[in-house]
Image (tube, helix red, strand yellow):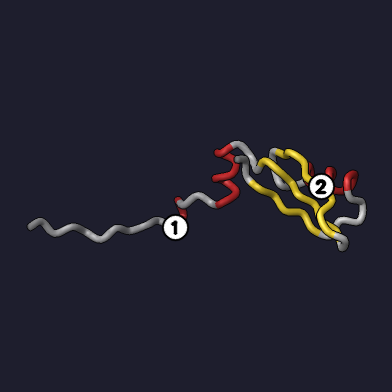
């Protein structure tokens, strides 16, 4: 039987989660919450300033932003 070499993974060439989301086409939805609970959600291409701007308008006292990928 032929002996196989061990697989070596070059960690420098691995894609990061952010790179994978960019390839997929963006996050999809930003979800804002405040101390009382959820404030709203909005479609976004990236979880950055677009999500922050939405939460500033929809939920002025927001405490957290979560981004979810497209379904």
Mark 1 vs 2, N-terminal side = 1
Front label number (1 vs 2): 2
Q: Residues within 10 Å of mark 2 (few under 14, many from 20)?
A: few
Q: Residues within 10 Å of mark 1 (few under 14, many from 20)?
A: few
Identified at 71% across, 43% down, the residue is 29
Identified at 92% across, 51% down, the residue is 60
- Whether 24 is drawn above or below 4: the answer is above
Quadrant that contains the C terminus: top right
Quadrant that contains the N terminus: bottom left
Residue furthest front in the image: 37
Identified at 84% across, 44% down, the residue is 53
**Residue 34, located in which quarter of the rendered image?**
bottom right
Residue 57, percent from left and from top: 90, 44
SS state under label 1: helix
Q: Is residue 67 left or right of residue 14?
A: right
- Whether 59 is drawn above or below 70: the answer is below
Q: Is residue 26 left or right of residue 44?
A: left
Residue 19 disc label = none
Residue 48, percent from left and from top: 74, 47
State the residue position of label 2.
40
- Whether 1 is drawn above or below 24: the answer is below
SS state under label 2: strand
How far is mark 1 from mark 2, CA to CA? 38 Å
Is there CB contact under 8 Å for labels 1 and 2? no
Residue 38, percent from left and from top: 81, 54
Residue 47, percent from left and from top: 71, 47
State the residue position of label 1.
11
């Amino acid at each position: 039987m032929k002996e196989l070499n061990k697989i070596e993974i070059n960690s420098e060439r691995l894609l990061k989660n952010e790179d994978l989301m960019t390839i997929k086409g963006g996050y999809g939805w930003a979800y804002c919450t405040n101390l009382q609970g959820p404030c709203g959600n909005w479609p976004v291409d990236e979880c950055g300033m677009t999500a922050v701007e939405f939460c500033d308008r929809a939920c002025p006292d927001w405490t957290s932003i979560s981004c979810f990928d497209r379904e």
